[in-house]
Amino acid sequence: MFIRKEKQKLGELLRDLDLLNEDQVKQALLLQREQGIKFGDAVVKLGFLKKDDINWALSNQLNIPYIPDLKEKGIVDPASVALLPYDFAEKHCVIILGQMSDAVNIVIADPLNSTVIEYIEHSTGKHVNVSISDEKAIRDMIEVLYKDGGMTAAEHPGEGNVAQIKTEIDTVIQEIGTGFDAEIYKNALCISFDKRAKKNVSIQLSYKNAEIGKYFIDIVIDNTIGVIFSNRDIDEHHINALLKLSKLQGLIVMKITEKLTLEALE
């Protein structure tokens, strides 16, 4: 099981390990801000460290395995890879390597990203054992496993799944917090889901194969799951009727109060 240490920025960690001095950290932070790149990439670009040095440092400091070659036979179980949607794996540079009855083994480029690790724990219901590898190596393997292996983003079984999407929305809310109006959450969800989400969508309602009108949906994800924001309770019979009359596979209702609540129906 991966035991989280107190969250520490990469620059602080490398400085504490005497791999960078204070001036080098400041230079890397400046380059990071100027070019909009990751801190580790800035360090490598400045020639202070090699990428392998950073991965080695993270591996040793966090006491997790470093896997330099993901192409080695037997490292990846294709059936376990399918537990994560392609878009999520690609966005966060993470792969589920394998699973046991109570745990999953993952490889990730940023093992300090506790939000992603907690999401995987939540979505799989299992403990997460973390290992680290080079970002390019992981991305290359993602393309092989998902695309070359015939599992495209649109076909992936994790997408279009109401429970999966609800978990992803929960993760966004945990990062932002409660107490904001609906528009804040709409914008945040559209950023998080990127091209998978469309805001303010008018969907067609049909009865006996004939169009009977339109219905406004706050967000539609993967063209199949609707998200509705409301400051009051919505009648479940109305939701069921909406699902019956539309082509949506599921609906997630976000009740905006002092404490956000989510209800998923399909």
Image: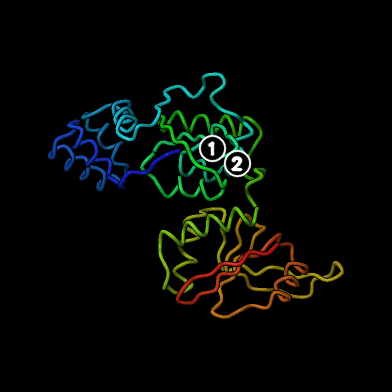
**Mark seen at residue 83:** 2
Which percent across, then down, holds residue 264? 63, 64
Q: Is residue 231 above or below residue 111?
A: below
Which percent across, then down, holds residue 194? 51, 54
Residue 99 falls in which quadrant of the image?
A: top right
Mark 2: which secondary structure?
A: loop
Dot 1 corresponds to which residue?
A: 104
Q: Is the C-beta separation of discs 2 and 1 under 8 Å?
A: yes
**Mark seen at residue 228:** none
Q: Residues within 10 Å of mark 2 (few under 14, many from 20)?
A: many
Front position in the image: 35 or 7:
7
The residue at 52%/45% (across/down) is 88
The residue at 56%/70% (across/down) is 254
Direction from residue 111 to residue 35 in the image, left or right = left
The residue at 58%/44% (across/down) is 85
Residue 81 falls in which quadrant of the image?
A: top right
Question: From mark 2 to mark 1, how far is it between C-alphas?
Answer: 10 Å
Mark 1: which secondary structure?
A: strand
Q: At label 2, which amino acid type do we have?
A: Leu
Front position in the image: 26 or 55:
55
* On-image quarter of the C terminus: bottom right
| Residue furthest top in the image | 73
Q: At label 1, which amino acid type do we have?
A: Val
| Residue furthest bottom in the image | 232
**Which one is in front in this view, the residue at disc 2 or the one at disc 1?**
1
* On-image quarter of the N terminus: top left
Q: Residues within 10 Å of mark 1 (few under 14, many from 20)?
A: many
